[in-house]
Image (spheres, rainbow, N blue to C red):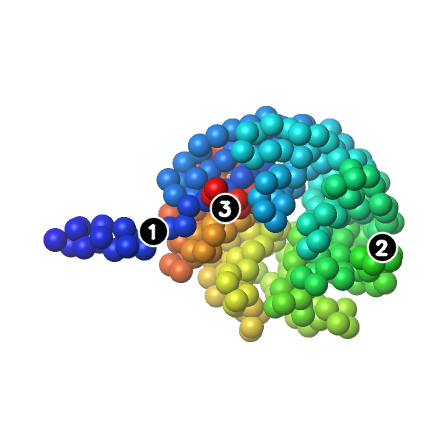
Amino acid sequence: MIRTISALCLLAQPLAAGEIWVTNEKDDTVSVISTETLEVIQTYPTGERPRGITFSQDFSRLYICASDSDAVQVMDPATGEILHDLPSGEDPEQFVLHPNDRHLYIANEDDAITTVVDTETRKVIAQIDVGVEPEGMAVSPDGRIAITTSETTNMAHWIDTETQALFANTLVDSRPRHAEFVKNGTEMWVSSEIGGTLTVFDTETQTEKAKISFEVQGVHPDRVQPVGFELTTGDSHAFVALGPSNHVAVVNAETYEVEDYILVGRRVWHMAFNEDRSQLFTTNGVSGDVTVIDVAARKALKSIKVGRFPWGAAYRAAN
């Protein structure tokens, strides 16, 4: 009877179907995971060393940073066909799509620039000098500000998207990797991999509001390296990938306090939620798998084997 009731409850509240697309850095492929079955349902070839990955707003186009091919590739996710390459500058690592669904802001690690590409005309519309080894990219919800983080300069660079010019530079801790605007764009967060921290800025003033540190029991501090992070519905909590510590931290986004740590695969890099944000999928580079986390329970549910060195992840709604 208990099993019957549980099954009926599951049938009454099914998880929203969709897909998590994962770039495999060493295999030059993307793996497609069903959020319903939690299995890999397809694998497609890409250019060399795919890392950053994002979808157009209607999910009809997939953009892939093929870093060693010096290109942003555009894929039809319905077929896995590479439609064309976009000019990207050298060694594109991460990028972000502007809310206009047209302009890509791309971090070019080798050239210390941010390249802005029009995805419709397939032309570069700006190249902006930033710090050494740019990686992280973010854009504000209103589209007015783009952020590039530079790993060697240890800065977040603030870009006016109307003039395509820098208007501020703010210091962060060593080797910043990922950036996100949160709380309707009122805050901007940056993770620092070697510094072991996450810095919170006030967007209006570009001043530091808080700095979050991490301490995983039984793990040497040098291995606690924050990289990618994602926020839950309402931006109440952040889930932060802590690299070779093999843990994801759960941070209260109001108090900036760490509430929990979740053990996942080896060298966790980035992550993506399913549609209703009830599950979180983390890319674990060294173990070559994706960990599925139950967000409410804060527990790992399953590991899904993908390709070698999974790096980026993006959600796609089902057709």
Tell me how many marks there are: 3
Q: Residue 156: in sight, yes or no?
A: no
Type of residue at label 1?
Answer: Pro
Q: Nearer the viewer, mark 2 or mark 3?
A: 3
Q: Is residue 70 above or below residue 319?
A: above
Q: Nearer the viewer, residue 103 or 33?
A: 103
Give coordinates of residue 163: x percent, y percent: 87, 58
The x and y percentages for residue 176 are 71, 53
Q: Amino acid at mark 3?
A: Ala
Q: CA distance from mark 1 to mark 3?
A: 15 Å
Q: Callout 2: helix, strand or loop?
A: loop
Mark 1 element type: loop
Q: Amino acid at mark 2?
A: Gln
First in sequence: mark 1 vs mark 3: 1
| Left or right position of 209 against 158 | left
In three-dimensional space, the C-alpha distance between marks 2 and 1, rounded to whole angstroms, equals 44 Å
Q: Is residue 202 above or below residue 289?
A: below
Q: Which residue is mark 1?
A: 14
Q: Nearer the viewer, residue 268 or 41?
A: 41
Instruction: Classify 10 Å Cα crowding around label 2: few (below 14), some (14-19), many (20 and above).
Output: some
Instruction: Tell me whether circle 2 and circle 1 mark residues in contact (CB < 8 Å).
Output: no
Figure quadrant of residue 12: bottom left
Residue occupying image coordinates x 75% and y 72%: 204
Q: Is residue 244 above or below residue 139?
A: above
Q: Which residue is mark 2?
A: 164
Decide which of tag 2 and tag 1 comes sooner along the chain: 1
The local secondary structure at tag 3 comes to: strand
Location of residue 267 (image quadrant): top right
Q: Is residue 79 visible?
A: yes
Category of crowding for the residue at label 1, using alpha-carbon neighbours closer than 10 angstroms: few (below 14), some (14–19), many (at least 20)? few
Q: Residues within 10 Å of mark 3 (few under 14, many from 20)?
A: some
| Residue at numbered disc 3 | 317
